Image (cartoon, grey):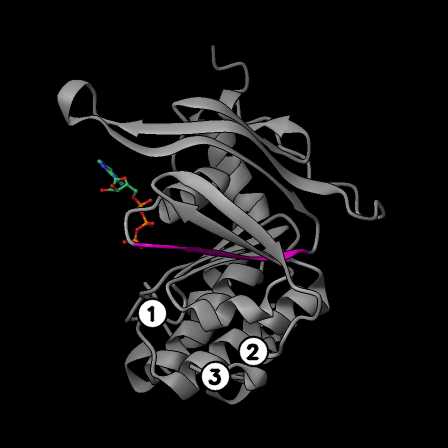
Amino acid sequence: MNSNTAGTPVRPPPRGAAHALVFQVRHLGKTYGSGEVAVHALRAVDLEVRRGEFIVLLGASGSGKSTLLNILGGLDSASSGQVLFAGQDLSQAGEAALTAYRRRHVGFVFQFYNLIPSLTVFENVALVTDIATDPMPAGEAIGMVGLGGRSDHFPAQLSGGEQQRVAIARAIVKRPDVLLCDEPTGALDYATGKLVLDVIERINAGLGTTAIVITHNAAIAGMADRVVRLGDGRILGIDANARKLSPSELAW
Ligand SMILES: Nc1ncnc2c1ncn2[C@@H]1O[C@H](COP(=O)(O)OP(=O)(O)OP(=O)(O)O)[C@@H](O)[C@H]1O
């Protein structure tokens, strides 16, 4: 069944192709448990994501947002249907291939930063460059999130927003094709949340990294190319924004 267990590299989408599809999600289903306790987290989800798109995933608690993001990122597997990354079927990939996929192509940012407390900012980011195939210098990624002067500081010496920016630097230093963010501003106050959104926007626009951001905050939807609304494991609607707003134009 697992035809790709040896860790065969999953290739990125061709760089030159305009609007190349990064993800093709076809009739994706995810069920946790079975029988009477089965939870249908995703039901027949169809979605296409283009290279360089900024997608916001909105939906009530339990609607399936994290499940979808985790399957796109190779952290979880589908129960039914397909997820293609650059035309290659992740649903058929084995553990080793999924690990290689995550390592080469996916940057994750979560609500909580998960930095290593005993390592400096530089060391937290450099840890990734040791195992990545084509990383940018750690200092460059730290500079991109505006923390060039804080490289020698430890996480405990940084604010929550600064720690989240280190987590973003760690996610992008390997030049991932996709940046998957699960409630990246969930633990942050208004102004700090905007700074973090600003960084995500700059990475999306500047590096062309496809960004998919989960949020409970509907105001953030203004930043997206397209807003995907989930409810009860289904896509309720997809709206395109005629004009994307910058974080400074958002208010909540
Ligand atoms: N490992 C698991 N085992 C059993 N059920 C799960 C598991 N993970 C998620 N679920 C269930 O799947 C459904 C979708 O969960 P998911 O975390 O994707 O929702 P969400 O939209 O991200 O919610 P939130 O906004 O609260 O994070 C929920 O009913 C949840 O309880």
Secondary element type, mark 1 = loop
Which label's residue is closer to the chain start, 1 or 2? 1
**Percent of width and height locating residue 131:** 52, 49
- What's under tag 1, amino acid-wise? Gly
Ligand 1 within 8 Å of disc 1? The answer is no
Q: Any magenta on residue 52?
A: no
Calculate the distance from the C-alpha at mark 3 to the C-alpha at mark 2.
Answer: 14 Å
Q: Is residue 9 visible?
A: yes
Quadrant in the rendering for residue 245: bottom right
Instruction: Identify the image quadrant of the C terminus.
Output: bottom left
**Label 1: how many Cα within 10 Å (few below 14, some 14–19, many 20+):** some
Calculate the distance from the C-alpha at mark 1 to the C-alpha at mark 3.
Answer: 15 Å
Q: Quadrant of ligand 1?
A: top left
Seen in the picture, residue 33 relative to 149 is either above or below; the reply is: above
Label ID, residue 186: 1
Secondary element type, mark 3 = loop
Instruction: Between residue 192 and residue 165, name the one nearer to us.
Output: 192
The span picked out in magenta is 53-60
Seen in the picture, residue 227 relative to 92 is either above or below; the reply is: below
Relative side of 96 to 223, left or right: left
Secondary element type, mark 2 = helix
The residue wearing badge 3 is 251
Seen in the picture, residue 35 relative to 238 is either above or below; the reply is: above
Which label's residue is closer to the chain start, 3 or 2? 2
